[in-house]
Amino acid sequence: MLPAAWRAPLATLAAVWLAVFLVTWREWLAMFGQWWNSSTYNHILFVPLILAWLVWHRREELLKLPPEPWWPGLFPFAGALFVWLVGSVSGFDLFAQSGAVGALIIGVMVILGPRIAAGLALPLGYMLFLIPFGDELVPALQMVTAEIVIWLTEASGIPAEIEGVFIDTPVGLFEVAEACSGVKFLVAMTALGVLVAATCFRRWRSRLLFMAVALSLPIVANGIRAWATIYIAQSQGIAFAEGFDHIFYGWVFFAIIMFLLLAIAWRWAERHPDDAAIDPEHIMESQTLARMAEYRISLRAALLGSLVVVLAFVGWNLAALRVEAALPDQVYLPGVKGWQAARTPQGLAWQPRAGGADHRLLGRYANVQGQAVDVSLAIYAKQTDKADAAAFGEGALPPDTPWRWVGQGEGTGTYGSENLFALGRYRRLAQTSYYREPLLTGSALRLKLATMRDRLLLRPNPTATLILSAEERQGRPAAELLADFRRAIGSEGAWMDGILQSR
């Protein structure tokens, strides 16, 4: 039976959560779509059940603590909604989703108080695993896996050469593709590791040691799995090795590693399953929490303050989302001194991705020797979640094509560089610049920060993505061709400005 002292606070918390859900429903809908449709995040579908279990396991001890609405919590509550606002207006999904989840977490502290928030520290912290993150680690994990694979391949006596994420062996060329990076494995094991570390161990040293094992085990194991595929292929053929890899990795390998992790926790566990999850007497005796609890307010004031904060950020968000730069009806790629428009076909079709762009220009220029440079310019009146120049999957590496990312090339502050490879023989260098006046950068992060600043200050600035690319095997290194082309156009920012101001 729920004590009377808890009924009104829980009803008020439900009202605040409902208000946050209504404001951030787009983020929750997007998150659920990723949980349901992406195999990397399917495990998150179990997180709400885990959260319910963690709260239920603490229910008897929690009911011994008094709900005490806490007005200083309104400041971090506003901070979480500010993070949501920043992500919402800039199209930075990770920020927007983090803010949406963070507002729910801190709402508990505002309505129920610091003591109960301390008792719910684990479930509240575990709510962060509702945020789908990990895709950003894919390139780094590909490179780590490739390094493990080449070391094991050479150690096992198989001659091999590595270039980026490609490994050439006597039976064929292997790629450590995005699906082989192990990110699905790592993200799921991180969530499991945190849960086990928090519930099975008492000392922070033990928890940190266990997490070190939980994070390193899937990375090393994924490298061993990828090496085993190559090793089996040397004697049984690539087709057999790929089939074995999919079946073994999908149904057996993950279960084996998870069993090993749980076995470690079981062997060295410091907590008994029947132990109380929290100590309410220790929480009530804490001087720090007692001093924090002195800043209590009435439940009605906490509800009113929370709703005022929510409505303030709703108004700011609506105003920011209406900000849109004026663009010309038509834009054209201008002539470039010493270069002419070329009609020669590409060795292998290549076209960068620019989802949601308001204008898209694609051109091919050739110098007097016939050496060609491909130009892609995407222009956006505003950045949103569906029109984000720096989003994952946008840019020089077109998805669902033969093109693969090999590694980073040499870049500068004004452009980033990527080496692309396809079908074992086509190579291409692509250099990407982002422009948002006055910023010209090769950093997607710097672009996002500039976008956030402008949208929050209600400044309408367009965004442009310029990608210059050249094929190798034109009698000259692609990097030299692109450098010549850059010298011909002069300042990239001024060049793009001229296109943006064309009428």
Image: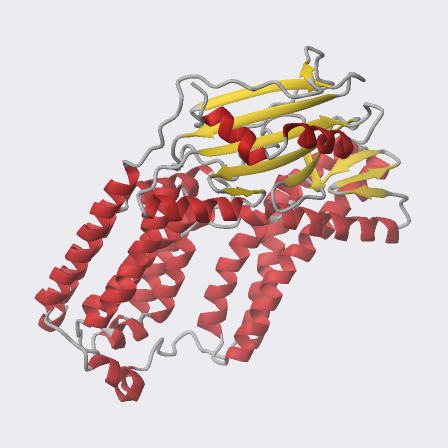
Foreground pick, 85 / 138: 85
| 274 up-or-down from 392: above or below | below
Total tally of numbered discs in the picture: 0
Q: Quadrant of the C terminus?
A: top left
Q: Residue furthest top?
A: 343
Is residue 272 visible in this depiction of the protein?
A: yes
| 158 up-or-down from 350: above or below | below
Which residue lies at the image location 65% right of the left edge and 35% below the top edge? 431
Foreground pick, 479 / 281: 479
Which residue lies at the image location 53% right of the left edge and 21% below the top edge? 361
Residue 32 on image: x %, y %? 37, 42
Q: Is residue 413 left or right of residue 2?
A: right
Asked which quadrant contains residue 442, the reply is top right
Foreground pick, 231 / 223: 223
| 329 up-or-down from 9: above or below | above
Residue 182 on image: x %, y %? 62, 48
Q: Quadrant of the N terminus?
A: bottom left
Is residue 428 visible in this depiction of the protein?
A: no
Residue 118 on image: x %, y %? 31, 75
Q: Is residue 425 left or right of residue 416?
A: right
Which residue lies at the image location 51% right of the left edge and 78% below the top edge? 204
Asked which quadrant contains residue 233, the reply is top right
Residue 236 on image: x %, y %? 82, 35
Q: Is residue 268 left or right of residue 271?
A: right
